[in-house]
Image (cartoon, helix red, strand yellow):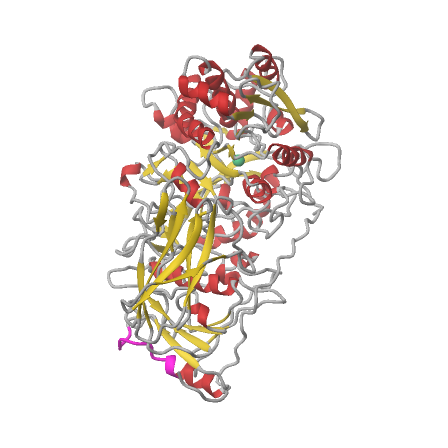
Amino acid sequence: MRTARLATACVLTLVGALALAVPAEAQAPSRPGGGQDKLEVYVGTLTPQQLETTRSAGVDLAEAAVSTDKSGNSAVELVLSGYQAAKLATKGVKLSPKKVEGKTASQALREQSAQGWSAFRSYSEPGGIRDEFTATAARYPKIAKLVSIGKSINGQPILAVKVTKHARNVEDGKRPATLFMGAQHAREWITPEMVRRLMHHVLGGYGTDAEITKLVDTTELWFLPVANPDGYDYTFTEGNRLWRKNLRDNDGDGQITTLDGVDLNRNFGYKWGYDNEGSSTDLASDTFRGTGPNSEPETQALDRFFRRLGFEFLINYHSAAELLLYGVGWQQSTPTPDDEIYKALAGDDANPAIPGYDPDISAELYITNGDTDSHATVKYGTLGFTPEMSTCQTASASVPDDEWEPEDCVSSFIFPDDEDLIAAEVAKNIPFALAVAKSAVDPDEPVSVVGRTTPDFVIDPFDVSYGRNQPVATIARRALKDVRMHFVINGARPKTVDVKEWKGGEKYGGTHDDYYAELRGKVTGAKPGDRVEVWFTGRKPGKGVVASDHFTYTVNSDIGGQVLVLAAEDVTGLSPVQTGTSAKYAGDHVAAINKAGYTTDVYDFDTQGRKAPHHLGVLSHYKAVVWETGDDVITRSAGQVPGTTTRSALETELAVRDYLNEGGKALVGGQNALLAQSANGAYFYNPAAPPECTDPDDLACLPLVNDFPSTGSARTRTSVAAAPGRTARTTRSTAPGRWPDGPARSTPRARPETRRTPPRSCPRPASCRPTSSRSSPARSPVTGCGRARHRSTP
Ligand SMILES: [Zn+2]
């Protein structure tokens, strides 16, 4: 620790306590786009700059098919209105309507509509899904009951069927309940087929299949095939197959045009309008969130239904991307305690619960706000999954010798109108659906089709502590009694202390924790150089005492300062090649801060084994952190190449984010500070490192995408200051953003060396790495398989 007085080498602005989110207001743009304008499938090859222009124009690239080659150009397939496409063209983004056998998607789909559909049916046509659900409930009076949960904006009843023993005599929600829901997005036709066929599977198995009989006798299964009946019916009318939203007449002109409709999966109250990336204020956008939280009658009906029933689980079927999503969606890389249940049920990339689907935290790559699952989870304690079902291309390729070929697909959303392919897709999904329903009886001990169980404890270990008194966290099953933390200093007698639940920070935490909680205890009385072993125990009803894994940390020799210099200069790295083995500028920062009257300690990335600092072990001990990167361009280890960065690049950022979330203050400085982190997915890392990612095309590598550098608003600003004697560069978003994910990502500050997107999905699960799980301090992404940066937004 050193002490001195203020220097004025550079003016530093602290990243303050996290600013509160103020919901952005929906604006009502007046502009052309109505009348004859239609949705169409567009394709093109875009440069990185054109891709950013497209994103900043409000086009939802998350929903688009995008694949980027090594030269940095991206082939895209987007559903846009003619007006949106023309507007992009004026900005230099040239796209053309996709043609299959000489026809545009809208032509091909119009012809197909005119011929009629063989396997699909609308909601309200005679013999359609509405009639079918009414008739089915009547046919099974002992175990089925028809319920209308409310009406659509055009007054159609939104029907659900409850299946349970004595369905009409047992109060709704009395037994553990699971909801299966489809067609919140109108064009995703495979999803109502999933829900209605699953219902028939259950009804048909009752009395003959022992497992299904037991399931129906002991739980409630609710089937809601079409959450957006108006929009779904609209897609059966000529020229409207690509419609996604409800039929809200946004501009009040008495007709439905491309300016109309609200995205029902962005309209829910929880985190509604949190930012303009996870949903849109643009009426014409496919993610238009509506004029207020729960503004749409379809949303209100579901909200009432969720509240009344108190479902244990929700499976909200969407398409098309072959994903199995769960957990926090509004902010990237945000694991939560109940993820332990989701992971046990969903499996991992190597062994997913639905074959060919990648299980993931909802916002690993793209964010959503106002979505259904998060609302149901946070408001009503319902554990939600969103399966993104198969694309047209994947389904067409699944049977090699049939008439359906991937190149015939006019859009990834247009699932083939083929009974066999639909039946195969549904069959593939049934085991997971039934396992979730079985798990409703005891959600924290779920029935897993991939043979996984939930842990009692998940520890959050670290190697080094910067304090004598050290908080330590674990995720623990809430069902455990008498949870305690134990520690041993230098092999002496164990001490036992109480733990307290961590209720969340200023910005996140404290949600998705109905069955698991984050508990913390505190080690006291350690001295520099001591080695401390820590573990937790609890009493499990019927099982006795259970214990967590143990871990051991060392107390650093230099501790006790007020300000930490987090020196991440990467002098032992490759970009650029530097001399020496320890940070070059840490001493200058220390001198400047000491002159200001504050005491300091240093965490040197290069001498700490090139590891990120732990937010509790290291950062939590300081009132402020100066994160300086010296002359580094990008964190890169031996053997890595342009387009790649280290796992520690993400982990350092997430550690600082966690620190800020608990009231810390940080200043970021360096010639190229946050270059990789602000490049919006241009750099790839291996979440299971070591070994680090050495090829951006390796499927094990993931793009470094997160929201941290977009910091900035009137209340919160990140200044990136130079190392002493250098010119400062400042990152500041001009839009009214908020920490940590304001909308500033449309303006990348760094030019990536290469820019590239992995292919659509893991070609075979076997080619994917096993998940890294929580092998790093509880904050590493849970996937080990590279995947497309394009996905259907759930
Ligand atoms: Zn969808």
- State left or right for residue 295 relative to residue 391: right
Part of the protein shown in magenta: 578-587
Report the residue at 39% width, 30% height from top: 394
Position of 246 relative to 784 (above/below): above
Percent coordinates x, y for residue 716 in the rendering: 58, 67
Please tell me whether the stretch drawn in magenta is mainly helix, strand or loop: loop
Q: Quadrant of the N terminus?
A: bottom left
Percent coordinates x, y for residue 78 in the rendering: 50, 40
- State left or right for residue 571 relative to residue 73: left
Q: Quarter of the image holding residue 675?
A: bottom left
- State left or right for residue 366 relative to residue 235: left
State the residue lying farthest toward the top.
139
- The answer to whether one can see residue 751 in this image is no
Percent coordinates x, y for residue 422 in the rendering: 44, 22
State the residue lying farthest toward the left.
639
- The answer to whether one can see residue 172 in this image is yes
Percent coordinates x, y for residue 301 in the rendering: 66, 32
